[in-house]
Amino acid sequence: MATVDLLFAALFNAAVLFLVTAGLQLIFGVQRIVNLTAGSLYALGAYFGASVFEWFSAQGGSPVLLLPVLILSGLLAGQVGFIVERVLRTVYGRDEAFQLLMTFTFVLMFQDVLRYVWGAQPRLLGDLPSVYGTLVVGEFTFPVYNLLVMASALVVAGLLYWLIERTSLGHVVRATAENGRMAEALGANTRRINMLVFVLGSMLGTVGGALVIPTTAASLEMPIALIVEAFAVVVIGGLGSIRGAFLGAIIVGVLRALSLTYFPELEVMSIYLVVIVVLVARPYGLFGKAEA
Amino acid sequence: MDPKSGIDPKSGIDRRGVLKGMAGLAAGSAVGAFPMPALAQNTPLKVGIIAPRAGTAAYIGANGLRAVEWSTEKINASGGIAGRKVELVVEEETNAKETLERARRLVLQEKVDCIQGGYSTGVTLPMAPTLEDMQVLTIFWDGTTQDGVKETMPSPKYVFKSADNECEAVMASLIALKHLKGQFKRIAAISPDYTYGRNVWTAFKALNKKFGIDAEVVSEQWSSFSQLDFTANVAALKAAKPDLIYCVLGNADLPIFMRAATSAGLTDTARMVLVQAGHQHGQLKKPFTPVGTLLCYNTMYFARPNPSPAQKEFVEYYMDKYKDYPHWESDRAFFAMNVYKAGVEKAMAAKGGSWPKPEEIAQAIEGIKVESFGGPAGMRKDHIAEEMFYGGFATHDNPYDVCTLKDTYSYDASVLQKPPGADFWGWLETANFPV
């Protein structure tokens, strides 16, 4: 019984982590930018999702539509990626440190924007997850909302795989990731690809934030809390790899659940011990590519 | 000021005029025709307020700020404190270093007569010795722990501390021991990983032992201070199969934890003891706060039967204006302002109507009794507040969207906190508790 409960908690945590880190990986894989704003986009999605759903409810919308409304609000909030990318574009040709600093600047600015728009107090969405009820299987009780979030993450993983591996747009994206100049020489509009990838990555983060809001609270601490785990996922899975994000998120989710059960004080340490092991034994992560 | 003429270009007052005025004032004062304190009585009484306005503690700070503003309006409407209107100067409480700088600004720049507020022990403990050195009359709303008091401020002269944080936890333990004895054999805890959380959990275990309850500790969950996802903690608690969970969460984390615990079925198998329920009771909605949950409301319970007139009026005002239920930090802020008022007036009466010095006000506050929102309250001679604490078991039988208490149990702080000079752990072992 304990194992099933722990696994369920771990997979829920992993599902949210995957959504955010998939965006992080996608952007790094194509644009070679370590996007520190991933945590801020996650928080933006949470705040925006909460506000949109409150507005939706005030208009008489049914609580049963919680999930689709939150997904749509996350997709909408992700459009902020257009603005961020437009500014980041000015440092594409420069040293990676400039890009990192630029995304860090956005983290600080987002923090103030969130505080200005939504205030400093954490925002909760009441008891909305209960509208979907619980699934009781024998002696186990699973909140259906959490199951839906996990299913959403799986659908996103499948869609991302299909988009990148099976569509002509995906071929161009992969070509841009492999060799941007060559892709451009062959007629690919890499500027447009970069923008599309960045906005798509941003939307993954904001959808992740919007989906998690019914089970937590939107707060100004969200970006930092998320980024601590997200970077562990990225290092373990391999920078730039979507498959790595998937496996890394599961590993971090399970590690977190296990450490909270058996060594609660060592939650962060247990995750970062594995990070160190991966960095030493396989510096490019489980699915990352070694630099040529 | 122009160095040649000695005239301030803004005010147009010259040095000679100022000197003449000062000489005149001194002469007038000497003959009693124009006593110096009257000067003070013509200016507003400035009270510096320090409260958290951001982060997970913002909700608590807002409760205090709203109450102190309400109290000030009431006091000013009835003539102020000893004839002087009260003017509030609010500063934000963040970390210890920044907050101390803001407190210095209040003293040196704003020249406040008194500082009130302070929520976090991590801020009030390091701030208190500096304010004591600066001889600033300070009345904390909160942030008093047993260990901290013992270590940093053995006998303050200007600083007054709140009732010990541990009071509500001792009360939670006493209610649980009295009403749930025999109903739990496996206990677990979840708390932010800080001194208070660890102290009160240790106190609960010590009281179990003292009263002969041999409960097995099956899980201890220590969360980070701003943690807002408890899915894994709930799974770990479920796995441990406790019959009673001693929960010390008290910020935005508490309703999130309760929501996760309820949806995972944890509250079906374990009785919840919410030590700091009063911190977030407006967020503890009925669907995820089961009937029978032990709720502790600290020094103010908004739905207390037969409330004091001040509480009744304030609760109605608060619920009407903010569409929320006020909690204990409102009481603490009201208490601090009224203790200060009573202290000033007592000291002034003792001086025959002239304005007292800060140390004279401080002396007057020692042992003073006032009526707070939560009922009779006072300040001990050792500068620690004594107030009433409230708790009981949750019922859904009320017109609100949150729980209230089926029966309200009240405890005087004199029962719940160690006497002056005593060691907390030694006192726990020897005290005669009403169980």
Image (cartoon, rainbow, N blue to C red):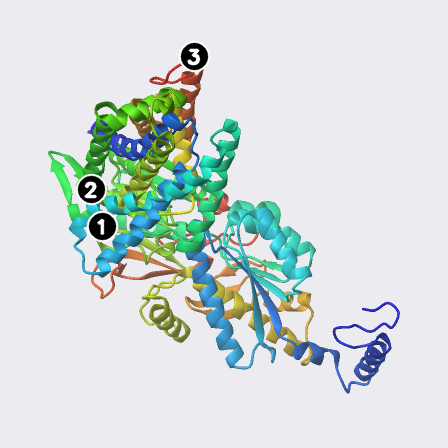
Image position, residue A75 (x, y; %): 28, 43
Q: Amino acid at mark 2?
A: Tyr
Q: Quadrant of the N terminus of chain B?
A: bottom right
Could you say which quadrant of the image residue B88 lies in? bottom right
* Image side of residue A47 versus residue B414, left or right: left
Q: Chain of mark 1?
A: A
Residue B372 visible: yes
Q: Which residue is mark 3?
A: A292
Q: Looking at the image, tell me whether mark 1 or mark 3 is earlier in sequence order.
A: 1
Q: Residue at x 34, y 71 (%)?
A: B320
Name the outermost residue toward the left. Answer: A138
Foreground residue among B266 and B163: B266
Q: Kindly check if marks 3 and 2 are in contact, taking CB atoms under 8 A apart as contact.
A: no
* Image side of residue B417 versus residue B17, left or right: left
- Against B180, residue B352 (above or below) is below
Foreground residue among B221 and A152: A152
Q: Secondary structure at mark 3?
A: loop
Q: Which residue is mark 1?
A: A128
Could you confirm whether marks 1 and 2 are on the same chain? yes
Foreground residue among A12 and A48: A48
What is the number of the mark on residue B95? none
Q: Secondary structure at mark 2?
A: helix
- Kindly report the distance in space between the C-alpha atoms of the residues bearing marks 3 and 2: 44 Å
- Kindly report the distance in space between the C-alpha atoms of the residues bearing marks 1 and 2: 9 Å
Q: Residues within 10 Å of mark 3 (few under 14, many from 20)?
A: few
Q: Kindly check if marks 1 and 2 are in contact, taking CB atoms under 8 A apart as contact.
A: yes
Q: Which residue is mark 2?
A: A145
Q: Looking at the image, tell me whether mark 1 or mark 2 is earlier in sequence order.
A: 1
Q: Kindly check if marks 1 and 3 are in contact, taking CB atoms under 8 A apart as contact.
A: no
Q: Amino acid at mark 3?
A: Ala
Q: Chain of mark 3?
A: A
